[in-house]
Structures are given as C-alpha cells and as structure tokens.
C-alpha cells in the first residue's frame, strides 16, 4: 500500500477532469503537523499558473473532482491553495489488515524491475581495510538490500583496487627481499600494513626505487608470469582480511562479487585504440589525454582526463571506462550506482562524459555516482588513531563489540554469558552501522562511541531495544507472528501508528531513488517512537481492556515488530528477542 501514490493518481485524474494534462504534478506530501491532516496536495498552485487562474479557486474545483471514496474523512483547503487530506480510520485499518497477511508487509511488487549494478566497498588490496572503507561498504550494502527487496535484479561489484603503482612498489620490495636470500615462505605478508609502510618509505626516499616500481607495474599489466605470481600473494592475503571484515559487518558481499581492476586488463588496449580512433584521446606530453571542454575552468581551459600514462601504464580512468562498457553493454544494466567518497566527484564526472561520448555507456543506462562525506573524530578532523595513524576497520569493530558488552552488562540482569556476548556483537556492530547510515550520505559526521551506543535517541541500541520490548509484550500475551485478529483503529495514537506503518513503501522508494539509507533510519526511529507513544496511551494487557481491543492492539504490535525487523535487516542490522 502506497498512500502517496494512490493520492497522486486520484489527484491527476481530477486534474484531467479540469482540463489539465495527465502528468500534471500533484505534489502530494506527508503533512508536517497533525492539524494539517495526514497528507497535503499542493499541486493546485503550480497548475493554476498553467490555467492562469486563482490557485485557491482551482483547489476548490480540484476538491470537488477528487474521488477519494472511503479513504478520507475530509479534504480541506488551506492558505493559498493547499489541500489537507485526513484519512479515514476504517479505511486505514482495512489496508493494514491486508498488509498484515503479506510477507512483504504491504510493499507492492516492483512492476518494472531493473538490472542495477552497484559498485561499493572497493578496498585497496595493497593493505588492510581501514575506517575509510566503512561508509562505501555499509551504505552500498543497505541500498543493495533495499533494491533487492523492492524486486530489482542487483549485480554487486566489488571494484577492488588490485592494480597500479602500489603493486609495482610492493613487488619491487618483495623481489629485493628474495634477492637478499629470504625464502618466499618466510616473507611476512600477514601484516600488510607493515610491509606496505616499508615499501612506501623506499618509494618516497630511495633513489631509483620509484622507477623500478613503475617498471614492475608495466610488467604486471603486460602479463609477466613472475610478477603476477608475486602479485597474487598480496591479493590472496588482502582478500582474506576483507572477507573477515565483511563477515563481522554483516554485509552481503561475497567472493563472487569481486570484480577488481585487473578483471578489465584485457580490455584496456582496445579502449585506448578506440579512443584514439574516435579522436577523443590525443597525445599530450607523452601521455594520452581526453580534453573535456564541458568541465573547463574559469579561463576556458578544458579539463584533462588522462587515460594512459607516459611509458604505457594505465590508470583508474582506463579501468573505469572499461567497467562502463562491461556494465552497460555486457551486463545490460539499466542503472549503475557507484559509492565513493566525495573527493572522487570530478573523476566520475569525467568518466561518465568520456564514456557517453565514446559509446561505452548506452543512453538507456543511468549512471549515478553517489558520493559520501568523511567520518570525523570528535576533534573535528578525519578519524585517526591517537598516534595519528589509520584506524583498521577490523580493530574498530572489535572495539565496538567490547564497548557494547560493557553497556549491555549494565542493563542485562537475566542473560547468560553466551547471550550477553551475542547481544553485544549485534549491538556493537549495529551501533557503528546505524550511526553512519542515519546521517545524510553527503555529510561529514562525528564518530562518537557514547552517542552511538546510547539507548536513547536515534541509535541502533534504541531500535533494537524497542523491538525486544514489543516481542516481550507478545510473549506475555502468548501470541506469535501467525496470530490473526480484526484490526480497528479508535484512538488517535492507533491511527498515527497505522499511518506510519503504511508509509513503509513510500520510504523505500525514496531510499532507492536517492540512494539515501538515512531516510529509512529516520523512518524506523519515528516508527519506534510512535509505538512507544501508542503503548503508553493504549493499554494492551491491562485488566479491563475489552478482548477485541486487546486483539487489535496486539495486531498493531505484531506488525510493528515485523516491520522494525525487516527495516533493520535492510540496513544490515540484526535484532534479538531478549536484551
């Protein structure tokens, strides 16, 4: 059930009756205050301009033409032409009754499913994952889960950075260790950070090492068997680390989803030849460059997009163009979504422009680069260790569970040690994810242990606890999710809870449209808060409550718990029956 969609259809039908086009914007929104009803229809003002008439007068005519049937008690005109719609409680109860028997919770099947390629996480395989990979991984996974629930065919692609200069640097460093007589089995690759740090220092400080590293890059990209053998050592070790992180984070990426930069290597020479043949790429100072006038600076200088370096090496630009061709033509994607930090915004604008010009992206393929802000420490600077180093993501998650256990132990009185450990894992990981996902994707945010582990406010622990409270009520009532009774909405708190429950589909559509999981986070928090208000105002298990009223309120409780669980699952956050 999508009330907003239904009201839009009815409003557009009324517009047609008034002589306006069928696609006239109905501008249906959720009302911001109870005195404005449940929904507002604001399209009369823009439509009045087309008809050159008074908007309030047109709103009056629109109300007369609106066929709302039994779904609304009234549709009042307010201000210069707003129409406030107050929904009927019996109609709402009937819609919720129908949704309660549906395993999709009333979310209608996708009438036009798309093939969507989602590129997310994408760690650099030269070293372990750090906190900078958190946002791409969990935002991407939440959007993927929501797309799949909606009914789209989703192709996950973990575009891991397993190519480029850093690997030439690592191979050169490894070769020198082997030349010094150290056996390959004795080379410590377990701590990639230390090995990478050693190699990077040599790259920056040691004469000739950088050139040697670049030579190895060209050898690697040219298919040198020895280089590829050594390269594979780093890849295998890195993927082992990333797999462990994905498991801890409860994200859905698997080995099968890895589509690294190296996967496009065989296409790169063809991409370069094609760009030259189309006169898109030209030589400039020894490199091959596409100059983009569309992104020219204030002086009119075109934006340079380098596709091949001096010496023949390829870049991210080259593999990203190959990825466009593969996703749009081979995978026949209707939409491509890419999650990276905001600093890569210009790069992906350039990629899309060149890919469109060259025909690597079909016109039918939407290309959405979805940037995100930075995780900041409480000092307002990018999140680092106390010594200023990069925080490993695995270590951050371990600390989250330890801190959550301390919080849970303070509150839990009847849980076993094993139960406390399991609850702490779910609370700790959930807290880190929700704290991130609940922020607007494009914003920076402050990382705070105290805030994210709080049981008050918009946090995962609050929502997980709200879920357990509802389940506790159902256990005391000795009913489960299969329980069925007739829904009736009498009190205003019952109605407001029902309206919010029926807005689930509207919320998911916004998450999918804008790739903004924070909209789902906000919805779930508001739902949990409304349930608490309903529970305080509308007794369920107290003596004197009439059986049919009790049963209806139990139905509202069951639906709320199911929706909280489903909504949190779309965010990749687990719930528990007891806490």
Image: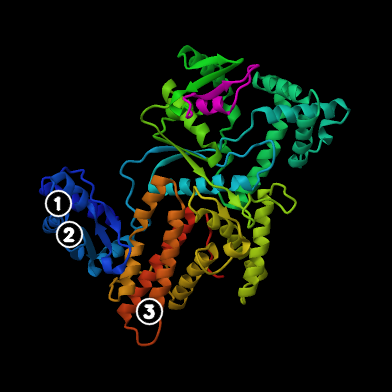
Res. 341 in view: no
Label 1 crowd (10 A; few <14 / some 14-19 / many >=20): many
C-beta proximity under 8 Å, tags 1 and 3: no
Which residue in the structure is indicated by mark 1? 14
Residue nearest the viewer, comparing 282 with 431: 282
Quadrant of the drawing holding the N terminus: bottom left
| Residue 495 placement (x, y as % from top left) | 30, 70
Give left or right: position of 1 versus 372.
left
Q: Earlier in the sequence, mark 2 or mark 1?
A: 1
Give left or right: position of 328 versus 183.
left
Q: Residue furthest top?
A: 277
| Residue 38 placement (x, y as % from top left) | 28, 64
Report how far apart the C-alphas of labels 2 and 1 lie in the structure: 10 Å
Give left or right: position of 427 versus 509.
right
Q: Residue furthest front?
A: 299
Quadrant of the drawing holding the C terminus: bottom right
Asked if 481 appears above or below 243 in the picture, the reply is below
Magenta segment: 297-322
């Amino acid at each position: 059930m999508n009330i907003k969609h239904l009201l839009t259809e009815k409003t557009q039908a009324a517009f047609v009756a008034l002589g306006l086009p069928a696609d006239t914007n109905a501008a249906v929104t959720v009302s911001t205050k109870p005195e404005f009803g449940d929904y507002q229809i604001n399209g009369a003002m823009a439509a009045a301009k087309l008809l050159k008439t008074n908007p309030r007068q047109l709103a009056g005519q629109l109300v007369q033409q609106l066929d709302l049937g039994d779904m609304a008690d009234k549709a009042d005109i307010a201000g210069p032409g707003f129409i406030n719609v107050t929904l009927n409680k019996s109609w709402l109860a009937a819609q919720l009754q129908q949704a309660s028997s549906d395993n999709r919770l009333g979310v209608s099947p996708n009438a036009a499913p798309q093939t969507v390629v989602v590129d997310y996480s994408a760690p650099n395989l030269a070293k372990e994952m750090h906190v900078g990979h958190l946002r791409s991984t969990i935002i991407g996974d939440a959007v993927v889960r929501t797309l799949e629930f909606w009914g789209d065919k989703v192709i996950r692609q973990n575009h891991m950075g397993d190519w480029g200069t850093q690997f030439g640097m690592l191979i050169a460093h490894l070769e020198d260790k082997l030349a010094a007589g150290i056996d390959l089995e004795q080379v410590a690759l377990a701590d990639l950070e230390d090995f990478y740090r050693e190699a990077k220092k040599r790259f920056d400080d040691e004469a000739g090492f950088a050139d040697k590293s670049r030579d190895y890059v060209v050898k690697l990209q040219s298919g040198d068997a020895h280089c590829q053998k050594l390269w594979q050592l780093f890849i295998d070790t890195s993927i082992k680390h990333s797999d462990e992180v994905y498991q801890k984070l409860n994200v859905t990426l698997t080995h099968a989803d890895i589509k690294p930069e190296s996967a496009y290597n065989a296409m790169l020479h063809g991409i370069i030849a094609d760009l030259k043949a189309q006169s898109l790429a030209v030589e400039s100072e020894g490199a091959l460059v596409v100059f983009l006038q569309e992104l020219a600076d204030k002086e009119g200088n075109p934006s340079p997009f380098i596709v091949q370096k001096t010496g023949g090496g390829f870049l991210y630009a080259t593999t990203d163009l190959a990825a466009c061709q593969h996703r749009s033509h081979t995978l026949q994607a209707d939409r491509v979504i890419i999650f990276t930090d905001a600093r890569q915004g210009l790069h992906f604008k350039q990629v899309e422009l060149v890919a469109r010009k060259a025909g690597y992206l079909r016109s039918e393929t939407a290309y959405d680069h979805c940037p995100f802000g930075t995780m900041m420490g409480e000092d307002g600077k990018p999140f680092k260790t106390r010594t200023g180093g990069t925080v490993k993501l695995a270590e951050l998650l371990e600390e989250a569970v330890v801190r959550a256990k301390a919080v849970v132990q303070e509150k839990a009185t009847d849980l076993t040690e094993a139960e406390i450990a399991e609850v702490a894992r779910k609370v700790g990981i959930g807290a880190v994810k929700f704290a991130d996902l609940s922020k607007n994707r494009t914003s920076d945010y402050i990382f705070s242990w105290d805030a994210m582990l709080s049981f008050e406010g918009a946090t995962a622990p609050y929502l997980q606890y709200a879920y357990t409270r509802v389940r506790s009520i159902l256990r005391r009532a000795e009913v489960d999710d299969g329980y069925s009774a007739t829904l009736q909405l009498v009190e205003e708190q019952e109605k407001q809870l029902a309206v919010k429950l029926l807005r689930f589909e509207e919320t998911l559509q916004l998450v999918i449209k804008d790739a903004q999981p924070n909209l789902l986070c906000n919805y779930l928090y508001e739902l949990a808060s409304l349930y608490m208000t309903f529970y305080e105002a509308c007794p369920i298990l107290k003596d004197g409550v009439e059986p049919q009223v009790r049963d209806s309120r139990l139905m509202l409780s069951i639906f709320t718990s199911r929706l909280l669980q489903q909504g949190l699952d779309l965010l990749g956050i687990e719930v528990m029956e007891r806490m």
